[in-house]
């Protein structure tokens, strides 16, 4: 048997199943998450060319993870940075190279839109982005917007969007480099250069991580390793005082070992299938994203027009010496124009921002089990209007029309509001919207001979959702607490056991819950971030959705010492018990299993030896917790890592802040 892979709601087993999506062994309040400052964070709507908006003016629930927080916690993988964001459930089967899924507010992994510098990187094959592909070395910030966003962003934004913003490259010349080694014979390096002025700017960076890994099976002795390499270039030119060109390209390459999935040696009737050692199984994947834009701004920001063209592709291959190799390729092209008009009163007490968008999207899909190349097209128009009144009331509304040659026409919308009371430092926020997700290309056209049959007649999944919350600031900003309640209903949910075609479920799947976040600064040198999520997510039959815990919480603490040269960090992640799905080792009949709750503690330290050199170390899973994120697959135990980081900035403009 080959590996079990759960992508979206699908349950896979049987010969050749790992070849299906070729992803390895994975089965399946507005708060600024900033470790060094409580100042407002700016959220960027990169794809539409909208004016950046302070978080306090947004009605949506937003969390921003900054570069400072990534460095304080010594995060290497994007998914690890998102474990502390309220409302998100992270599932990684085992090793760092294993397929890693993120579910927002109980929705599926393909219901969240993922962007890098405005370019969508969700695969057209399964609709998801594999978060294990992305290292964080050149990421400036991560913006997580929760709740239906299809009214502005279209399909795949049913539950929200994750916007990854990399270093732009403007400013003085900078060089940064790092090297690290640790447990499981893990090695990683990174190097980046950037710089620019008023007329030209750019950055180039590369990062790589290789690990011998550990044995993801309870039987055998074979370790399952991984190699991940990222490369990115980003830059821009000011061709005229009112004409700017920008572009970027990012390549993410990965090789990851995985194991078979089936009856363990000595298994008895009634036992469940688990991962089983098998040498020679590996996944090879490459994700490429590129985008370019031309911005026309003749009136100093009052009227801004952006022409853009984006491309992304995900190429995956499974190497299987027993059942043979298999592969798939998904590609997306998107191009269009957006225009934003800003109008305000002379006293600047009222402002209206109106944006329009027209775009075309083409998707293609190939799989080795089908000789035909499949494709579909979609044209879209969208508009948004935002109003700002007396620096207290902020309203927005968006509507979008998508016309797909495969599924027909769909209209989605979204409204949001934020009301700030300066006297009490209270902010109310809320949103209401609809969402849509088209069936994936694999669900329409994918084939596993003898097991999976596609269903071209599937209907798109649709949803209606809302949230409402209150944010309260205390002690001149030293304490900020946000509590948000949300609900979202899903209809036409797509389900498949991979023994036959996928189907649309009848009735509504319901998700509701509460998100709590608190940012505290008890002293000038200590920052604390606390989050908690209560989630009730069930399908249309009332059965709890898999791998979405009812209770999840986190604590992050950063303490600076020696006038900021040193930093100690601690992170605690609690994941409550959650339902998963297992298969009988001999009949492959589906059975429910319950994964135990777990708590993982990470500790870190960093010290600036000079203004240019930092040394650091961290302990992951410091108390060696034994847990599973996916039934039948081991996770890493205690691990220790250490490294050195170098940075250089032009002396005449260098800043003596050693922790940035």
Image (cartoon, rainbow, N blue to C red):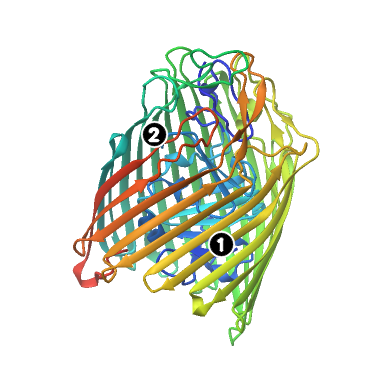
Q: Secondary structure at mark 2?
A: strand
Quadrant of residue 147 within the rendered picture? bottom right
Vertical relation: 517 (above or below) 465 = below
Residue 45 seen from this side: no
Depth check, mark 1 against mark 2: the one in front is: 1
At numbered mark 1, what does the secondary structure look like: helix, strand or loop? strand
Q: Is residue 129 at all visible to an observer of this figure?
A: yes
Q: Residue at x 42, y 17 (%)?
A: 278
Q: Residue furthest right?
A: 507
Query: Could you tell me how far apart the alpha carbons at marks 1 and 2 are, in whole angstroms?
Result: 34 Å
From the viewer's perspective, is residue 275 above or below residue 34? Answer: above
> Which residue extends farthest bottom?
347
| Relative height, residue 526 to residue 219 (above, below) | below
Q: Is residue 220 above or below residue 652?
A: above
Question: Where in the figure is residue 251, as x and y percent of width and height?
Answer: 39, 41
Identify which residue, 637 or 99, lies in the foreground: 637
Q: Position of residue 404 (x, y in %)?
A: 69, 41
Q: Quadrant of the C terminus?
A: bottom left
Q: Residues within 10 Å of mark 2 (few under 14, many from 20)?
A: many
Residue 74 image label: none
Q: Are marks 1 and 2 in contact (CB under 8 Å)?
A: no
| Count of marks overlaid on the render | 2
User: Given the current orientation, which residue lies at the most extreme front position?
Assistant: 623
Compare marks 1 and 2 and give the one earlier in the sequence.
Answer: 2
Q: Which mark is residue 517?
A: 1
* Closer to the camera in the image, 517 or 26: 517
Residue annotated with mark 2: 254
Task: Where is residue 31? Give x, y as percent.
Answer: 54, 64
- Characterize the local packing of mark 1: few (<14), some (14-19) or many (20 or more) Cα atoms within 10 angstroms: many
User: Where residue 130 sits in the image (x, y, percent)?
Assistant: 49, 39
């Amino acid at each position: 048997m080959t590996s079990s892979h759960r992508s979206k709601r699908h349950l896979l087993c049987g010969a050749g199943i790992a070849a299906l999506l070729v992803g390895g062994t994975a089965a399946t309040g507005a708060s600024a998450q900033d470790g060094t400052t409580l100042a407002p964070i700016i959220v960027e709507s990169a794809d539409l060319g909208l004016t950046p908006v302070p978080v306090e003016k947004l009605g949506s629930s937003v969390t921003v993870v900054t570069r400072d927080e990534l460095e304080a916690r010594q995060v290497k993988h994007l998914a690890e940075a998102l474990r502390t964001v309220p409302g998100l459930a992270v599932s990684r089967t085992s090793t760092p190279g294993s397929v890693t899924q993120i579910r927002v507010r109980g929705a599926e992994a393909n219901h969240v839109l993922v962007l890098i510098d405005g370019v969508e990187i969700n695969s057209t094959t399964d609709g998801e982005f594999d978060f294990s592909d992305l290292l964080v070395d050149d990421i400036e910030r991560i913006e997580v917007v929760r709740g239906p966003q299809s009214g502005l962003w279209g399909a795949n934004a049913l539950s929200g969007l994750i916007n990854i913003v990399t270093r732009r490259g403007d400013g003085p010349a900078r060089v940064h480099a790092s090297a690290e080694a640790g447990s499981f014979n893990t090695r990683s390096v990174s190097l980046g250069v950037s710089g620019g002025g008023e007329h030209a700017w750019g950055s180039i960076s590369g990062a790589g991580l290789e690990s011998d890994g550990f044995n993801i099976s309870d039987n055998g002795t074979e370790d399952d390793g991984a190699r991940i390499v990222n490369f990115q270039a980003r830059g821009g030119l000011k061709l005229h005082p009112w004409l700017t060109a920008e572009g970027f390209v990012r390549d993410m390459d990965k090789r990851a070992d995985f194991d078979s999935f089936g009856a363990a040696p000595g298994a008895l009737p009634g036992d469940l299938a688990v991962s089983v050692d098998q040498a020679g199984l590996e996944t090879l994947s490459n994700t490429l994203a590129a985008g370019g834009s031309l911005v026309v701004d003749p009136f100093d920001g009052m009227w801004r027009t952006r022409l853009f063209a984006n491309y992304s592709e995900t190429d995956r291959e499974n190497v299987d010496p027993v059942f043979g190799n298999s592969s798939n390729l998904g590609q997306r092209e998107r191009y269009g124009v957006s225009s934003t008009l800003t109008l305000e009163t002379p006293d600047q007490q009222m402002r209206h921002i109106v944006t329009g968008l027209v775009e075309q999207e083409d998707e293609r899909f190939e799989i080795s089990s089908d000789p035909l190349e499949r494709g579909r097209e979609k044209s879209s128009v969208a508009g948004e209007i935002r109003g700002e009144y007396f620096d207290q009331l902020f309203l927005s509304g968006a509507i979008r029309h998508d016309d797909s040659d495969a599924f027909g026409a769909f209209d989605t919308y979204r409204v949001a509001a934020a009301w700030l009371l300066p006297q009490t430092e209270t902010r109310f926020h809320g949103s209401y919207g609809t969402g849509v997700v088209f069936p994936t290309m694999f669900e329409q056209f994918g084939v596993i001979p003898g097991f999976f049959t596609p269903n071209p007649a599937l209907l798109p999944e649709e949803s209606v959702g809302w949230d409402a919350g209150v944010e309260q600031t205390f002690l001149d900003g030293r304490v900020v607490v946000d509590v948000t309640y949300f609900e979202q209903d899903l209809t036409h949910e797509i389900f498949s056991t991979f023994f036959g075609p996928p189907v649309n479920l009848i009735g509504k799947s319901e998700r509701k819950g509460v998100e709590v976040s608190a940012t505290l600064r008890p002293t000038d040198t200590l920052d604390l971030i606390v989050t908690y999520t209560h989630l009730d997510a069930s399908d249309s039959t009332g059965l709890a959705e898999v791998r979405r815990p009812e209770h999840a919480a986190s604590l992050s603490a950063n303490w600076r010492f020696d006038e900021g040269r040193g930093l100690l960090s601690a992170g605690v992640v609690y994941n409550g018990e959650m339902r998963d799905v297992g298969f009988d080792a001999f009949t492959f009949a589906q059975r429910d299993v319950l994964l135990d709750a777990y708590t993982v503690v990470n500790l870190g330290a960093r010290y600036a030896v000079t203004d240019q050199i930092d040394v650091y170390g961290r302990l992951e899973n410091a108390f060696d917790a034994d847990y599973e994120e996916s039934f039948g697959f081991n996770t890493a135990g205690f691990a220790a890592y250490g490294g050195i980081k170098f940075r250089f900035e032009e002396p005449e403009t260098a800043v003596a802040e050693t922790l940035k």
